[in-house]
Image: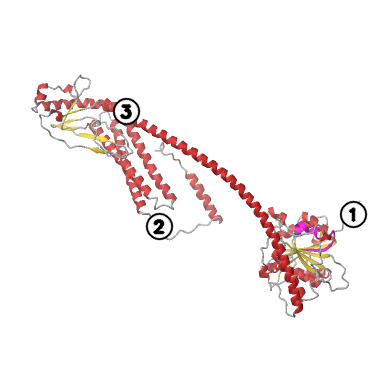
């Protein structure tokens, strides 16, 4: 069976797959789902199919056993020809019955498709069962045919030696029967069978049993064929006459029947009904070969028609594939064009929306100011939950932002209110909070340093709107205060030199920036060697740069970048741990950063001395921003890094 069904051992592959699956389960990459408590049973058609396949396999195995027995009989030199003939008949009947059973099994397999619609593995298994049984049956028929062809001469010789003895006893019986034809003719036993004698045909008496084998084509009913009838051994007057019956095997894939008509008795005077012509075996073989050739020719013609239809179908499929490819290309072009037009439309809508929002806010602020001035009611601050937005924003995307070409072309007066300090003459912005968020530090700077203008830069639209609305409401609620702070929506990584002059700023704040953990996104970090050049340009010599973070890896990154830059030097480093109430930070003596140990603040008294030098540092212990409060509630340590802008080097 290995030559018919190509199979090989795949145990190693199965073990490797099982081992890989076990490792994935152990590592936690996949989870095994528990099986359901109840399992749907097999349908009636599937059960019938499996039982029929089991019985058919058993019958096929028994037929193989009979074929092996035939091999053993043919190998014996003195085997009885009648036993061989009977065994050949039995095997032929088994083959026909097996062929019928295979056809029925195919029908049952088709009926199971309705029950196993969503069980493709079961459908494939049933198909493999049918294919395997068909292959085994084809192998059985092939071996049976080869056996008959290889032992044809031997069986023919044995049948020739057995038939004359039977005909001699047959002639004696006929002579004593009282038939005048047999008595006058004086038949000799040698003239009853041998085909070489002229004018004498082989005779077989009536009591011999005839078996007719006919394998009709598909769709036809079984018929009796006189041309294919052969002799079977029978008993005449107590003497056994033996002869080999050669049965053709036609249309094994179709149904077939065996018919054994009953013995009939006729009057002794009717000689035509008492005799039957025996066709020579050679003539039967010639006729069988002619019939086989005709069937082969018809099969070749049918295959030619099938191949022609298949070539036509392939050509039509090729044309259809070409049309699909052309339609796909046209669809891609149309989609690309539609995408471009949609982008243009969305950009226009975004620009108009931003303009409408600005005009609405300006009109609303004017109306609110007039209303509050005319009435002495309290002003309500904006609610933060109405301005929530995603914390992360791509700084390299194409945002719709307004920015000046040069710093002197930007009008700062419409952002800041009228000042109440007579000695305030500095109209430039000195403090900048990059990524100000909801403006917690900005509002503290407004009260601590009322004579210095501070600006918060934020790229998120809703968050920037919240800060601007809150500044406007605080100005109305507290007249004369919060006139020195403002908020701008811009991208500090791109347009910082468009707003500020060289050396204009005194302090820059970077509080809890986005860490961007992935290596490929390190270029998005707000502290990087390239952006430090921009900060050194707008920061005045002696100015300070403040950085805070709750991510140790980002703290090491920022410390390394600032230490390696030629225009910055690390001045102070400190770490803070959450307080017991979770609303403030307390000084921590442990600070592990790659900096000079003299820059590390190792005591709370030392930090208090630094606060007296730079009062801004006390804000970082009060958790001014939402991110600092979140880090404190979650128990994360905060790292503070203060750097100073060095003097510009003297050029020769």
What residue is shown with label 2? 40
In this rendering, does residue 80 appear at all?
no
Q: Is residue 173 left or right of residue 430?
A: left
What residue is shown with label 3? 290
Instruction: Name the image quarter holding residue 142.
Output: top left
Instruction: Name the image quarter holding residue 522.
Output: bottom right
Tell me if mark 2 has few (under 14), some (14-19) or many (20+) residues whose alpha carbon lies within 10 angstroms of its own.
Answer: few
Tell me how far mark 3 sits from mark 2, CA to CA: 55 Å
Tell me how far mark 1 sits from mark 3, CA to CA: 113 Å
Nearer to me, 317 or 648: 317
Residue found at the very far left of the displayed protein: 178
Asked whether the residues under the numbered discs 1 and 3 touch, taking CB atoms below 8 Å apart as contact, a structural biologist would say: no
From the top left corner, tell me how far across and down residue 83 is, in percent: 24, 33
Which residues make up the magenta segment? 492-510
Asked if residue 498 is among those painted magenta in the image, a careful observer would answer yes
What residue is shown with label 1? 650
């Amino acid at each position: 069976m290995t030559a018919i069904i190509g199979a090989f051992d795949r145990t190693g592959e199965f073990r490797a797959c099982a081992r890989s699956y076990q490792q994935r389960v152990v590592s936690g990459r996949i989870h095994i789902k528990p099986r359901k408590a109840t399992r749907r049973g097999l349908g009636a058609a599937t059960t019938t199919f499996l039982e029929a396949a089991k019985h058919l396999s058993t019958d096929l195995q028994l037929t193989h056993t009979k074929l092996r027995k035939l091999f053993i009989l043919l190998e014996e030199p003195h085997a009885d020809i009648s036993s061989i003939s009977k065994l050949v008949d039995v095997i032929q009947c088994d083959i026909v019955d097996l062929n019928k059973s295979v056809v029925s099994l195919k029908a049952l397999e088709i009926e199971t498709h309705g029950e196993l619609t969503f069980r493709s593995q079961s459908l494939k298994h049933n198909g493999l069962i049918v294919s395997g049984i068909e292959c085994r049956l084809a192998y059985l028929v092939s071996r049976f045919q080869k056996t008959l062809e290889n032992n044809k001469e031997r069986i023919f010789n044995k049948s020739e030696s057995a038939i004359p003895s039977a005909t001699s006893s047959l002639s004696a019986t006929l002579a004593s029967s009282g038939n005048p034809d047999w008595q006058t003719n004086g038949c000799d036993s040698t003239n009853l069978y041998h085909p070489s004698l002229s004018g004498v045909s082989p005779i077989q008496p009536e009591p011999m049993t005839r078996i007719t084998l006919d394998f009709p084509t598909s769709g036809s009913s079984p018929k009796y064929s006189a041309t294919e009838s052969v002799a079977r051994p029978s008993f005449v007057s107590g003497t056994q006459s033996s002869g080999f019956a050669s049965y053709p095997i036609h249309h094994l894939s179709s149904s077939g029947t065996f018919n054994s008509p009953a013995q009939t008795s006729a009057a002794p005077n009717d000689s035509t009904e008492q005799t039957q012509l025996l066709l020579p075996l050679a003539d039967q073989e010639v006729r069988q070969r002619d019939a086989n050739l005709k069937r082969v020719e018809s099969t070749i013609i049918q295959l030619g028609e099938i191949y022609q239809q298949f070539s036509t179908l392939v050509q039509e499929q090729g044309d259809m594939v070409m049309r699909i490819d052309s339609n796909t290309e046209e669809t891609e072009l149309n989609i690309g064009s539609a995408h471009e037009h949609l982008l243009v439309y969305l950009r226009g809508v975004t620009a108009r929306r931003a303009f409408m929002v600005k005009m609405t806010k300006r009109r609303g602020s004017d109306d609110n100011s007039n209303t509050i001035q005319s009435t002495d009611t309290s002003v309500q601050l904006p609610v933060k939950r109405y301005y929530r937005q995603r914390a992360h924003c791509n700084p390299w995307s194409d945002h719709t932002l307004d920015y000046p070409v040069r710093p002197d072309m930007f009008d700062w007066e419409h952002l800041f209110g009228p000042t109440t300090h007579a000695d305030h003459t500095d109209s430039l912005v000195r403090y900048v909070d990059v990524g100000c968020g909801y403006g917690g530090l900005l509002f503290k700077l407004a009260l601590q340093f009322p004579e210095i203008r501070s600006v918060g830069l934020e790229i998120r639209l809703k968050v920037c709107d919240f800060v601007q609305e809150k500044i406007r409401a605080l100005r109305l609620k507290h007249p004369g205060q919060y006139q020195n702070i403002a908020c701008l929506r811009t991208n500090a990584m791109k347009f910082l030199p468009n707003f500020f002059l060289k050396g204009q700023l005194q302090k820059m704040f970077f509080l809890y920036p986005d860490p961007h953990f992935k290596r490929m996104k390190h270029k998005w970090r707000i502290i990087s060697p390239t952006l430090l050049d921009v900060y050194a340009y707008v920061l005045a010599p002696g100015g300070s740069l403040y950085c805070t973070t709750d991510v140790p890896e980002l703290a090491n990154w920022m410390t390394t970048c600032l230490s390696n830059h030629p225009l910055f030097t690390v001045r102070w480093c400190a770490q803070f741990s959450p307080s017991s109430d979770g609303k403030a930070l307390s000084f921590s003596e442990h600070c592990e950063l790659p900096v000079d140990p003299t820059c590390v603040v190792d005591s709370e008294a030392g930090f208090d001395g630094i606060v007296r030098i730079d009062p801004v540092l006390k804000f970082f212990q009060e958790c001014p921003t939402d991110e600092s409060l979140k880090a404190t509630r979650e128990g994360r340590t905060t790292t503070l890094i203060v750097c100073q802008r060095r003097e510009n080097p003297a050029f020769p």
